[in-house]
Image (cartoon, grey):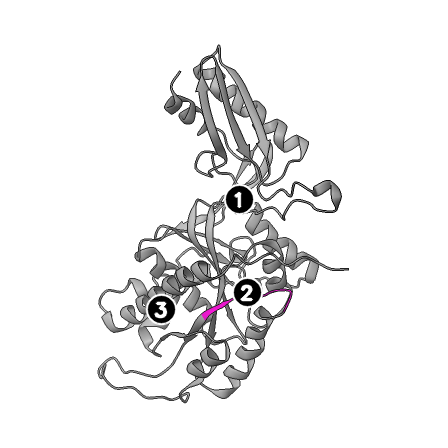
Amino acid sequence: MEVSKIAEALATVTDPKTGQDIITANMVLHLKVEAPDVSFTLQLPKLDDNYKQQLNFACQEAILSVYPQAQVHVHMQQPGLNPGAGQGGGPQKSNPLPHVRNIIAVASGKGGVGKSTVAVNLALGLQELGGAVGLLDADVYGPSAPTMLGLAGQKPQVEKIYGKPKIKPLYAYGLPVMSTGFVVDPEQAVVLRGPRLAGIVRQFIEETIWPPLDYLVVDLPPGTGDVQLSLVQSVSVTGAVMVTTPQDVALADAIKAMNMFFLPDVQVPVLGVVENMAYFTPAELPNNKYYIFGQGGGKTLAKKSNSMLLGQIPLVQSIREGGDSGKPAILNREDEITREAWLNVARNVARQTALRNEMMDPTRPVEMKN
């Protein structure tokens, strides 16, 4: 009996919670083979009976298909289980995305500042730097990702795993993407209240088959509301990227949105600030900068958040054209100035994320209090 063949067999077993195979999801621990015995620990986000039974039978079947005489022993455990659970302790909240290393929220105080443009180009920039990246367009009122990534009109497929439906994200430029815009007609008015909004966000997180990712970039609606709250309740958000334009009106709203992440029950670090539409540069005069919206808003917000200015993005026609045509500006190698501005943002976000993870403990999902 070979350990490698056992591992290959277990790689055919799918976790019904995430849609990933249990080897890729790092759920198999302490695999030990002493013929005819095969034993290992299966680390599960939850220990409910039906979930355990499904995976136990699936593991047994997979191994016995390779070694029919094997005696398979599966131990189930939940990460973070408090040994004193019976004395008032208990398990930590389960992680619905154990195979996603960092969740980056892109937020703004108001609409119209180019938040979705930042989210899309940031995701593609992090991917270009070598990361495995996904994009969750959680801006339920104005989902822009389908248009910006050339996916408008396409619908995600549904795959059943152990009888339960899971959503398969669409792909653009190698990027797995999920958006409300895939399931709602573009001209349909979206009128949703808190519980429905929270349900949509949880569905996109828990019922989408996200591949293993270094970064999941989440494009939030502007302001502070039910979607933001649902996100920080559902997952451990690594950090937030704030988007503003230079003028005082945008800055005032951005400060309010930023302060939500600093609430005592939330405490999500702000990785930095992107100042969009920082200056206007004509295509025929690439070295000229005209500060038509003023100056200094991004730096001011960065100081107030005790973070950094991640980058200044110029107001140029190619960025608008890239968003409308489904080919984001960062992919345009003919406009090296704009492309470099986006790559600079991605580099700074990657660096700030690494520093945040080195210096701070993971963010804990917000617990609802009655």
User: Alpha carbon of mark 1 to alpha carbon of mark 3: how far?
Assistant: 31 Å
Expressed as whole percent of the image width and height from the top left, the position of residue 46 reads 62, 39
Whether label 1 touches label 3, CB < 8 Å? no
Task: Using a 10 Å C-alpha cutoff, classify the residue at mark 2 as few (fewer than 14 neighbours), some (14 to 19) or many (20 or more).
Answer: many
User: Does residue 319 appear in the picture of this structure?
Assistant: yes
* Total tally of numbered discs in the picture: 3
Q: Which is more N-terminal, label 2 or label 1?
A: 1
User: Alpha carbon of mark 2 to alpha carbon of mark 3: how far?
Assistant: 20 Å
Residue 266 within the magenta-colored segment of the rendering: yes
Against 274, residue 138 (above or below) is: above
SS of the residue under disc 2: loop
Expressed as whole percent of the image width and height from the top left, the position of residue 160 reads 55, 35
Residue 23 within the magenta-colored segment of the rendering: no
Quadrant of the rendering where the N terminus is positioned: top left
SS of the residue under disc 1: strand
Of tags 2 and 3, the one toward the viewer is: 2
Task: Using a 10 Å C-alpha cutoff, classify the residue at mark 1 as few (fewer than 14 neighbours), some (14 to 19) or many (20 or more).
Answer: some
Of tags 1 and 3, the one toward the viewer is: 3
- State which region is magenta: 264-271
Three-letter residue code for mark 3:
Val
Expressed as whole percent of the image width and height from the top left, the position of residue 73 reads 55, 21
Q: Nearer the viewer, residue 69 or 195?
A: 69
- The quadrant where residue 194 appears: bottom right
Residue picked out by circle 3: 345
Residue picked out by circle 2: 268
User: Does residue 189 appear in the picture of this structure?
Assistant: no
Q: Which is more N-terminal, label 3 or label 2?
A: 2
Q: At x 50% / y 87%, what residue is drawn?
A: 248
Whether label 2 touches label 3, CB < 8 Å? no
Against 359, residue 15 (above or below) is: above
Residue picked out by circle 1: 167
Q: Nearer the viewer, residue 294 or 365?
A: 365
